[in-house]
């Protein structure tokens, strides 16, 4: 794609096709000879895992749609019919339901890898933005999909999330009614959610194609963060990375299979095995685990509109990240100060997830209470999620820009092939980074 | 417009804040050992058979199992599966179990509603014509369908066992409720009936179901002593099977898939080492 084509048509047919639609040349250049940095570690294999998971969800989803009935009276039972009477329906449905969780697990690892190695920085900003769009589409698709089995959590989750739109001033309620297709979450809502759930994965697939295109123009980043300088820095994608990604995918499939075959309901909520009942609200309405951190941010603010703005702000922040980061050093391998804040940030996201799973008034440390501050107990999850949400935003809006200006990075290797010489582990004590690389 | 806006905002806030107001509690389910636990666990056929009898003779008086067909009892993995009859519809034992039950049907010649003995292709008939009839006969609340009950509560079959064996007389200080029965394993909030210390409200709640089991209530054909504990364990196992009749097939398939993936991963790792041998990275 970036002018490195080494493809030579060998047969008459290939020569004929190459002058008309060079599709074999395209495939050869993108997945066979594509020069890839030779030092990519296992954190880089999740791109392949994600491609597989998207394919898995689309294939299993198409089969499920052949048996599923998007109607409030039949949806719950049709899912059960798939589990009971459709040949290998239990397999297809478990693959799909657990596949969503695995898809998000992989995408989170992919995003955190990106943050650590600074892959979002120039010249890969568009690649990063496309990734953010994919993530947003994934959240939408997962939400629509979770509504389809029409259990208690499906229904009441849909009510809570669609009501968020109602927080918008003036237009909110009208938009909500328009989304519902009526005056409550009901059959029209289920029907359109099914339609959108079927549509969005193909939109994702389209953006993934752009994402890969945008990857193949500058090429892969790598753990050192320095640019490829010569041919010795790279290896052809096939067989080197097809086999490495293949191995990682296979190991990932083992974990996936453990859920599918031995604990298919471990990641779901028991309340979703109760058919939806609009008149009976479950005790705790919680989203699936992969959306819990955003749910915690939403509930951290007592004002609903402010909570909604903050929640969408948490996602919007990701879109501007390439312009918030002031450091010229990509990889955190050479940025020991921000690395510490980065690991706290990972912990922070996990804490937000835990907060999202608990009721806001639950006590973090059981038995300790009485430290009332403003509207809630200081030992409650609502305060923990406020502190965690504050750190979430501070990491992107304060720490990231500030660190790039103030920190002293370690010396960065001159090339991918020579990292051994300047790897932090072998840097002489007291070595000062070259001043031109600072900031 | 403004009023509706407020109404929507209030509804949303109430939903968001909902969990904060409720204070339902329940006891952790008892630690029961099941034959079907773990990756290699299988249902104890005789236990599930006894459990079916408990359901049929006790539970089915009030609780439907709308997702179950008589043929399920005789399918592979089912309690009355017989390898001689791979098609459960021809299994004579399943046929006779179905035949014992009367179901409603439509006479195709006259259009009249008729009653006839069930066949293996029939659903388990529901005890009430509809939810309203079920609620009217049961103190205002319809008894829940039991088809996936073992998956619909935290703890699954252990919860069912604990609930069925957990009926107690209310502790001192807890006012009784007319037509309701105290059970520490039933999720509820009894703070309204509690007269003791505010921070010592008993766990559990009042359930509309009277204690359904009693010693000797069901006669087990295999001679098992018919205690409440035995009946509760067996019916919990039956409901666990009914909630996912393909669970055994799933685990068996999983074993093959796991072995395949482990070998495949090993081969890929060996290939990876071989291909990358001469690349310094």
Image (cartoon, coloured by chain):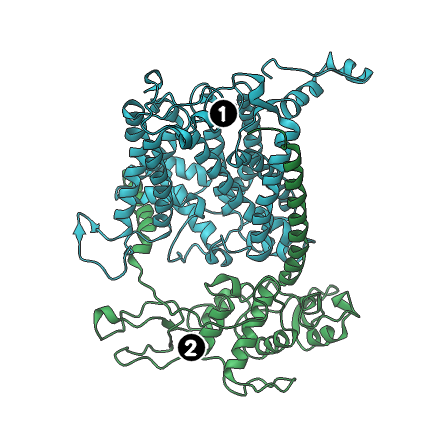
Chain colours: A cyan, B green
Mark sitting on residue B166: 2
For disc 1, the neighbor class at 10 Å (few under 14, some 14 to 19, many from 20) is: many
Farthest residue in the top direction?
A: A19
Work out which quarter of the rendered image holds the C terminus of chain A and state it: top left
- Could you tell me which residue is drawn at 49 percent across and 25 percent down? A221
Residue B22 falls left or right of residue A223: left
Q: Are marks 2 and 1 in contact (CB under 8 Å)?
A: no
**Residue A307 at x, y percent in the picture:** 30, 39
Q: Quadrant of residue A318?
A: top left
Q: Is residue A269 above or below residue A124?
A: below
Residue A432 falls left or right of residue A199: left
**Residue A354 at x, y percent in the picture:** 36, 50
- Could you tell me which residue is drawn at 68 percent across and 78 percent down? B100
Residue A74 visible in this rendered orientation of the protein: no
For disc 2, the neighbor class at 10 Å (few under 14, some 14 to 19, many from 20) is: some
Mark 1 element type: loop
**Residue A238 at x, y percent in the picture:** 65, 28
Mark sitting on residue A221: 1
Q: Is residue A342 above or below residue A145?
A: above
Q: Is residue A8 above or below residue A42?
A: above
Residue A26 falls left or right of residue B170: right
Work out which quarter of the rendered image holds the N terminus of chain A and state it: top right
Mark 2 element type: loop
Q: CA distance from mark 2 to mark 1?
A: 61 Å
Q: Quadrant of residue A370?
A: bottom left
């Amino acid at each position: 794609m970036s002018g490195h084509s080494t493809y030579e048509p060998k047969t008459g047919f290939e020569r004929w096709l190459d002058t008309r639609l060079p599709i074999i040349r395209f495939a050869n250049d993108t997945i066979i000879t594509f020069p890839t940095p030779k030092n990519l570690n296992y954190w880089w294999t999740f791109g392949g895992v994600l491609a597989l998971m998207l394919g898995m969800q689309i294939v299993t989803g198409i089969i499920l749609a052949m048996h599923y009935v998007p109607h409030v009276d039949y949806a719950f039972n049709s899912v059960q019919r798939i589990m009971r009477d459709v040949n290998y329906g239990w397999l297809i449905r478990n693959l799909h339901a657990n596949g969503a969780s695995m898809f998000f697990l992989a995408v989170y690892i992919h995003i955190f890898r990106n943050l650590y190695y600074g892959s979002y920085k120039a010249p890969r900003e568009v690649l990063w933005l496309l990734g953010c769009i994919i993530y947003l589409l994934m959240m939408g698709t997962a939400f629509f999909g979770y509504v389809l089995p029409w259990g208690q959590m499906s229904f009441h989750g849909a009510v809570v999330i669609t009501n968020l739109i109602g927080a918008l001033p003036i237009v909110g309620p009208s938009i909500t009614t328009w989304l519902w297709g009526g005056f409550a979450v009901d059959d029209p809502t289920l029907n359109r959610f099914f339609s959108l759930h079927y549509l969005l994965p193909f939109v994702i697939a389209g953006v993934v194609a752009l994402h890969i295109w945008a990857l193949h123009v500058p090429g892969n980043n790598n753990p050192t963060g320095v640019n490829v300088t010569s041919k010795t820095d790279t290896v052809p994608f096939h067989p080197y990375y097809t086999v490495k990604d293949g191995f990682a995918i296979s190991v990932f499939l083992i974990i996936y299979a453990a859920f599918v075959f031995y604990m298919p309901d471990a990641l779901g909520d028991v309340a979703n095995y109760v058919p939806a009942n609009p008149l009976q609200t479950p005790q705790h309405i919680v989203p699936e685990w992969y959306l819990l951190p955003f749910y915690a941010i939403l509930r951290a603010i007592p004002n609903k509109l402010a909570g909604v703005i903050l929640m969408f702000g948490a996602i919007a922040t990701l879109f501007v990240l390439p312009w918030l980061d002031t450091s010229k050093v990509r990889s955190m391998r050479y940025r020991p100060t921000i690395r510490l804040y980065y690991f706290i940030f990972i912990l922070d996201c996990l804490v937000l997830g835990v907060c999202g799973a608990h009721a806001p008034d639950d006590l973090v440390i059981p038995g300790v209470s009485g430290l009332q501050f403003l509207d809630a107990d200081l030992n409650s999850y609502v305060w923990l999620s406020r502190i965690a949400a504050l750190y979430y935003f501070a990491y992107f809006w304060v720490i990231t820009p500030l660190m790039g200006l103030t920190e002293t990075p370690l010396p960065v290797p001159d090339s991918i092939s020579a990292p051994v010489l300047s790897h932090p582990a072998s840097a002489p004590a007291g070595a000062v980074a070259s001043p031109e690389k600072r900031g | 417009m403004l009023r509706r806006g407020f109404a929507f905002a209030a509804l949303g806030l109430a939903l968001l804040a909902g969990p904060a107001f409720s204070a339902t509690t329940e006891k952790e389910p008892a630690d029961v050992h099941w034959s079907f636990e773990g990756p290699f666990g299988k249902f104890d056929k005789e236990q599930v058979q006894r459990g079916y009898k408990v359901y049929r003779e006790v539970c089915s008086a009030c609780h439907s199992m709308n997702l179950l067909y008589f043929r399920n009892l005789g399918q592979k993995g089912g309690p009355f599966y017989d390898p001689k009859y791979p098609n459960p519809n021809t299994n004579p034992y399943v046929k006779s179990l179905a035949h014992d039950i009367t179901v409603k049907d439509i006479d195709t010649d006259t259009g009249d509603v008729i009653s006839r003995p069930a066949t293996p292709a029939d659903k388990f008939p529901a005890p009430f014509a509809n939810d309203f009839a079920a609620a009217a006969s049961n103190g205002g609340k319809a008894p829940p369908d039991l088809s996936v009950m073992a998956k619909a509560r935290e703890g699954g079959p252990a919860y069912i066992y604990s609930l069925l064996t957990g009926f107690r007389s209310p502790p001192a200080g807890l006012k009784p409720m007319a037509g309701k029965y105290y059970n520490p394993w039933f999720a509820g909030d009894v703070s309204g009936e509690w007269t003791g210390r505010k921070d010592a409200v008993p766990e559990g709640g009042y359930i509309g179901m009277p204690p359904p089991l009693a010693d000797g209530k069901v006669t087990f054909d295999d001679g098992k002593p018919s205690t409440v504990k035995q009946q509760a364990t067996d019916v919990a196992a039956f409901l666990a099977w009914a909630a996912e009749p393909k669970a055994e097939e799933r685990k068996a398939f999983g074993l093959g898939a796991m072995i395949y993936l482990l070998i495949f991963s090993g081969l890929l790792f060996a290939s990876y080492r071989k291909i990358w041998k001469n690349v310094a990275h």
